[in-house]
Amino acid sequence: MSGQVPAERAPAKAEQIYEYLRRAIVRLELPPGAAVQEKDIAERFDVSRTPVREALQRLAEEDLVDILPHSGTWVSRISFTVAEEGFVLRRALEVESVRRAAELVTEQDGASLLASIARMRVILAENRLEDYLEEDDAFHGQIARISGYPRIWKFINLAKVHLDRMRQLSAPVPGHLAEVTEQHAAIAHALQRGNAMQAELAMRIHLDSSFAVMAAMHRDSTTYFRDDTAPRSARLRTG
């Protein structure tokens, strides 16, 4: 095949490449500082470089890659400042979401949340830590849906991408995800009882304690993090 993509298929291919790369970056399969080769991606998807560049531009707008003209593209290092901002936005929106969900939750909703927690426990038992984040997000996304404001989760997803990479880094911390799972269970049980105050408190405890683990990792190791005090031009030169 020529590797060229018909014009009508290019947007779909660009979206596919974007989703593939975004997931790989968030899951740290493409770690901070890794080079991103346009040629390799184009060959993998059997496309020209145009949809690859479109996908990379979207990732650059999310601050997930750094594109240096005539030099190359690298996965950006994690910004603790941006991650913390994402955490603050997430906490505000999720507290509101869970409070409203407590007023609207059905028996079927409660069963669905508990099923999600059961899947988390299976993931932990099988030591598939790299898969936990997606099930975690599915649980929180369900709460947003129950609240009647499903777009809340869309906004949270946009705000928390640097936070997600920190969440993935914290996954191997001994006992962390087991504790997170029990915190999810506390949220689900409060929702099942329709107790908005308990649900809000459980959500605050969950989000605050999880971020504390991530913040400690940032203090202890800066390998994957960038110096947010440095000028952007200097950050780009150092990957």
Image (tube, rainbow, N blue to C red):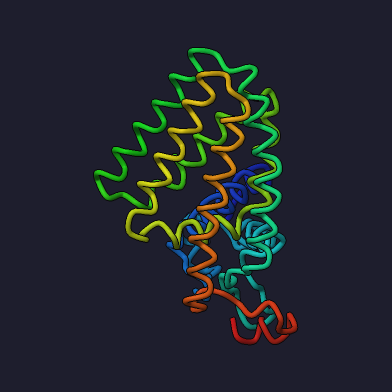
Report whether 85 appears left or right of 44.
right
State whether residue 55 appears in this view.
Answer: yes
User: Picture coordinates of residue 108 (x, y %)?
Assistant: 48, 14
State whether residue 2 appears in this view.
Answer: no
Image quadrant occupied by the C terminus: bottom right
Instruction: Pick whichever, 8 or 169, lies toward us.
Output: 169
Q: Residue furthest left?
A: 126
The residue lying at 65 percent from left, 46 percent from top is 91
User: Picture coordinates of residue 196 (x, y %)?
Assistant: 62, 26
Report whether 59 appears left or right of 177.
right
The residue lying at 50 percent from left, 20 percent from top is 192
The residue lying at 50 percent from left, 36 percent from top is 138
User: Picture coordinates of residue 46 (x, y %)?
Assistant: 49, 55
Compared with residue 96, is residue 3 higher up or lower down, i.e. above or below? below
In this figure, what is the number of numbered marks?
0
Instruction: Pick whichever, 161 or 61, lies toward us.
Output: 161
The residue lying at 54 percent from left, 37 percent from top is 202
Instruction: Pick whichever, 143 or 61, lies toward us.
Output: 143
User: Picture coordinates of residue 59 (x, y %)?
Assistant: 64, 60
